[in-house]
Image (cartoon, grey):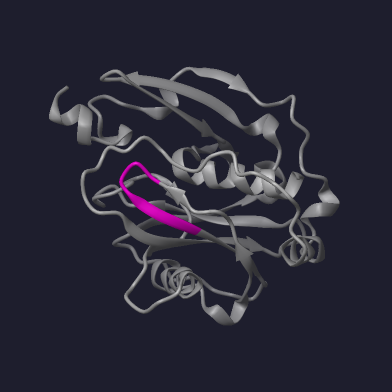
Amino acid sequence: MSAIELTTPLSKLPNFDPRKVPVVGVDAHLPPVAESALSPDALRQRFVMPPAWQPELLAEPRFADGAAVAASVLIPIVLRHEPTVLLTQRTAHLSTHSGQIAFPGGKQDAGEDRMATALREAREEVGLHAEFVQILGTLPVYVTGSAFIITPVVALVREGFSLDRNAEEVEEVFEVPLRFLMDPSNHRRHVFEFGGVRREWLSMPYVDGGNERFIWGATAGMLRNFYRFLSA
């Protein structure tokens, strides 16, 4: 097996475009999370008294040989009339997950806890200040193929905030309705085989004013676990 097969993420493979990988299934047979379960009070209560549940996606096939890195992301649920999830599109020149849709987040600094990391990264990447953020809790860690051990930190974000994105890291900031993301009829399954390794992932493409936001990979995996948590 060649070096590119061992160490290259899907997004860096020659001519690889996740949008062109065939869809092998859509999970329309699964029920969406009830709208009442997406209210701020219901979300708070779910973390206060979490159900017995099992995450569906925990780790991707490894393609990096380096040491594992602890990281956190913030899953910011913005309290609009209809709750939304704030997401970013990473700039194309970044060394990892370039050009992909992601949550604000990054590496954990020495002496920093997981929640502090998520808040700091959200402030540094998009200018979201902690005074607008109420952390609800965390979801199980998600391990990427690039060896990031990510803790998803779920939070409510009250209106009134302003954003100031870091143009070096973030190309764009946008929001997707939480209801859309928590409806499995919008969850598509893909399979791709390269170098004898079978890789599977979800995508959740969202059309925003004629612009398709292609949510896939780790971001879609963590959202799927959030769906499992809320629907348990």
Residue 79 appears at what percent x and percent y?
71, 65
Q: Residue at x 68, y 34 (%)?
A: 184
- The region drawn magenta spans 144-151
Residue 102 appears at what percent x and percent y?
45, 51
Nearer-the-camera pick, 209 or 5: 5
Relative to 131, is 192 on the left or the right?
A: left
Residue 127 appears at what percent x and percent y?
45, 73
Q: Residue at x 52, y 32 (%)?
A: 202
Q: Residue at x 52, y 41 (%)?
A: 221
Q: Quadrant of residue 113?
A: bottom left
Q: Residue furthest left?
A: 3
Relative to 71, is 31 on the left or the right?
A: right
Tell me: residue 117, above or below residue 217. Answer: below
Residue 163 appears at what percent x and percent y?
49, 70
If the image is split into quadrants, where does the N terminus sit?
top left
Q: Quadrant of residue 8?
A: top left
- Assess whether residue 150 is covered by the magenta stretch: yes
Tell me: residue 142, above or below residue 25. Answer: below
Q: Residue furthest front?
A: 52
